[in-house]
Amino acid sequence: MNRRSFITTTLLGGAVVSTLKLPGSAAAAEESSQLHLALLSDTHIPGDQKNGYRGFNPWQNLKDIIPAVAAAHPAGLVISGDLARLEGKPEDYREAKTLLEPLASQMPVYIGLGNHDDRTQFLQVFGNTLPGNHPKVQDRHLTLLEHPVVRILVLDSLFASNKVAGLLGRQQRLWLASNLERFADRPLVLVVHHTLDDGDGDLLDADRLFALLRPHRHIKAIIFGHSHTWKLSEHDGIQLINLPSTAYNFSDRDAIGWMEAQFQPAGVSLTLHACAGNRKEDGKITFIKWS
């Protein structure tokens, strides 16, 4: 942990909760008015450091990004899934853990799971370093970040390793249904891996998720990856934030990189840090106002 924050771990309604607390000082009071995070997605780290795709090297990209994230001094790092290259092999996670260690020694690192992850292998490699090794939502890995200005809930949409589609599943949706009301005192932002359209490779229960969220106006945004595309949209007043991949793009028009986020009471300021691909909007800042 860095000098500005520390983590405590508790259980809430069957899911593991990571609570970001700030020490009592004038600087901490200023920091408590916003939450500064680094947002990454689709790192696709291989066990073989030279493994690449479309002329890009995912391992090298993340290695190069790590110092930039550290230099930004965020309070934490969130990865929205697909940490591993394709099948979630143990060697993938061992390489990823080694790469992330310089950041993990300074700040909490929260990791969601995507379709190229393997839940069992992930927990075997990372379990003893993550808050909540044994989530109480059946066969799912959730993490909740608490902060005075925002709650961030990292969901688990891994349905089957190395299959494109994602699924929250009934148990995770039931947990959401039973806990959303208690989170109504401040904005709630969800993080999930899969895109939220109606295609066969998207989140298969996205419609049921939106129906569940619709009555709760404190849910302000959903952050996700999967498409390797930096894109903003909106659905039923909920802001949809599609993160770029750090590993490679599927189209030359898309950036490769990570996002810097400053969560405030009224919204979130997002800065694109493009390391490869289309770097035209590198450094561009976009403010999203909560509805």
Image: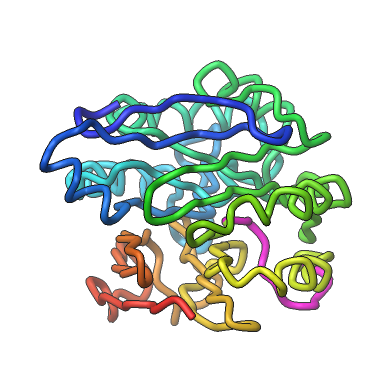
Would you place residue 142 above or below residue 189 in this image? above
Inspect the magenta stretch and tell me whether residue 194 lies in it: yes
The furthest residue to the right: 170
Vertical position of residue 92 compared to residue 82: above or below: above
Q: Quadrant of residue 206?
A: bottom right
Above or below for 174 versus 141 = below
Query: Could you say which is closer to the camera, residue 124 or residue 237?
Result: 237
* Start-end of magenta stretch: 191-201
Image quadrant where residue 59 sits:
top left
Where does residue 144 sit, x and y in percent of width and height?
55, 42
Pinpoint residue 99: horizontal percent, then vertical percent.
39, 32
Q: Residue at x 79, y 61 (%)?
A: 165
The residue at 55%/39% (across/down) is 46
Q: Residue furthest left?
A: 26
Residue 202 in the image, given as x and y percentages of width and height: 75, 68
Q: Is residue 268 magenta?
A: no
Name the residue at 22% across, 48% down: 31
- With 157 as the anchor, is 39 left or right in this view? left
Q: Return the residue nearer the eye: 25 or 251.
A: 25
Q: Main secondary structure of the magenta part?
A: loop
Query: In the rendered view, does 284 fall on the left or right side of 58?
Result: left
Q: Who's the residue at 81% across and 56% down the image?
A: 167
Instruction: Give the camera-side residue of 183 and 196.
Output: 183
